[in-house]
Amino acid sequence: MSSFSQNTTSIDSTSIISYGDKIVVKLNADTRSDTYFVSDRLTNTSLVILPNDNLRFSLSLDYEFIGFSIGFSPKLLAGNNDDDLKGKSSFTDYGFRFFLGNWTQELIYSNIQGYYIENTQDFIPGWEENEDPYIQFPNFKTIQWGGSTSYIFNNLFSFRNLVYQTEWQRKSAGSFIPKLEYIYNRFSNRVNDLKSVENAFDIKIAPSYYYTWVIDTNWFVSAYLSPGIGFRFSNSMEKLNEVILEETDEHFIKTLDSGLQLGFSSDKFIFGVNLNLDANWYNEDKTTNIEDDKFYAKLYFGYRFNAPKLIQKIFNTVNKKLDDN
């Protein structure tokens, strides 16, 4: 195994076992939902806006120093099939990642269309839950392109054990892992003759800390805390009857990302459960506060197996050339 594909230049095999030479296939199921809270302190009102996808799935594949995932939300499952009340939502999510020594790089793409107002009862007198339809925004779409770059300081801590399961943490350890995140967001909506579009670029830095407790030969518990700050640079446009209004803004962003994970790992099988909180908030103006919160649980199952000889040969050639350079 080349040093390029390892988390460190010299892994202590008594603390971390590497499975970078095996393909890891994993199925994830989570309850994540991109929820937006819009609060107006002047009128003391709030909107809770979210898509109609209570349960999401993703398939991931990791091998050597790269990985890929694709997310989807099946409509056949209970909780995802109530379009008559909450409207129809579509969800697409792609992720790509690779490792360079102690560096971890992730790239993401997400596309969600179709939202509804969860607190519809605050706006329609006499509205009854599970009987009356929610206020819906079928043309409200959010698109994200972005990425993050992280650095693992402690060579005895395995970040891959927690997130990608291409390693196995054998001894308890923690690490400071600062992260730089950069995301381009596009929000668009159309209601009758009113069309609105907002393009925003977020850049954030988060001084994260992770710790893994090995509680048995194959079991571990891990927790992390990642507060962050950053800026949003946005440009918005509204068009109504050929009248166009444009505005450019800058906002200070505060974030909090945290999680708790219980996991099992063996030479072939992996599974676990996560609880996660991902919160972002900023002041849109002097009276309006915007929050984008994600609190969710995730369940994952995975299997490790030997890569076909052709794939091994290709990656061995790539590793050799990178090491020679």
Image (tube, rainbow, N blue to C red):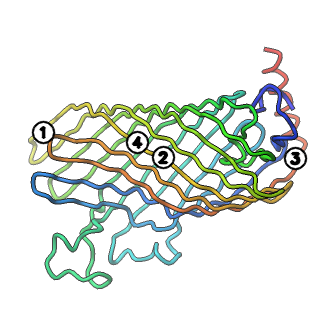
Inspect the image, locate mark 2, and give the three-letter code of the amino acid beneath it. Asp
Q: In this view, does 296 lie above or below 207?
A: below
How many C-alpha atoms fall within 10 Å of the one at disc 3: few (<14), some, or many (≥20)?
Answer: few
Q: Which amino acid does label 1 sit on?
A: Ile
**Residue topped by disc 2:** 257
Q: Mark 3 points at which residue?
A: 308
Q: In this view, does 33 lie above or below 98?
A: below
Circle 1 — which element? strand
Q: Which residue is drawn at 12% across and 39% down?
A: 244
- From the top left corner, tell me how far across and down residue 163 is, in percent: 65, 47
Helix, strand or loop under label 4: strand
Answer with mark 3 or mark 2, whichever residue precedes in sequence: 2
User: Which residue does the numbered mark 4 point to in the structure image?
Assistant: 255
Q: Circles 2 and 4: CB distance less than 8 Å?
A: yes
Q: Nearer the viewer, mark 2 or mark 1?
A: 2
Query: Which comes sooner in the sequence, label 2 or label 1?
Result: 1
Q: Where is residue 187 in the image (x, y as percent from the top left)?
A: 31, 46
Disc 3 secondary structure class = loop
